[in-house]
Image (spheres, rainbow, N blue to C red):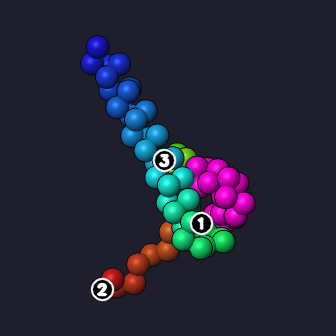
Amino acid sequence: MGASLMRAKVARRRSDFGDAGYRLAEHLFQSGCEIVSILIGAESGREAEMACGAAQAAATRCGMQVVPIIVCNAQRPPNA
């Protein structure tokens, strides 16, 4: 029982990233944005892919565009 509860919890958390990506993109489109850019770290995982995919779905539904931008993980300058 504990193992199945743990799997359900992980699946629920992952689905939240997709939901958040969709809702945020939809809100931006309804607020007047025509293009939404999503910055994704070069080492981002499955959660970033899910959020970006869901944002793409919102863009398709609204007839707008999402542009994913992959950024490199640069070193921070001293005192940053």
Neighbourhood count class around disc 2 (C-alpha, 10 Å): few under 14, some 14–19, many 20 upward: few
For the record, the magenta segment spans: 53-68
What residue would you read off at disc 2? 79
Q: Are marks 1 and 2 in contact (CB under 8 Å)?
A: no
- Quarter of the image containing the C terminus? bottom left
Q: Residue at x 46, y 52 (%)?
A: 20
Q: Residue at x 35, y 19 (%)?
A: 4
| Residue 5 visible from this viewpoint | yes
Say how many tags the image has.
3
Q: Earlier in the sequence, mark 1 or mark 3?
A: 3
Q: Cα distance, mark 2 to mark 3?
A: 36 Å
Residue 14 rendering spot, x and y as whole percentages: 44, 41
Q: Which mark is residue 19?
A: 3
In the rendered image, the vertical position of residue 69 relative to residue 78, given as above or below: above
Residue 80 highlighted magenta (yes or no): no
Residue 57 rendering spot, x and y as whole percentages: 64, 50
51 to the left or right of 5? right
Badge 1 marks a residue whose secondary structure is helix
Nearer the camera: disc 2 or disc 3: 3
Q: Residue at x 45, y 75 (%)?
A: 75
Q: Amino acid at mark 2?
A: Asn
Q: Earlier in the sequence, mark 2 or mark 3?
A: 3
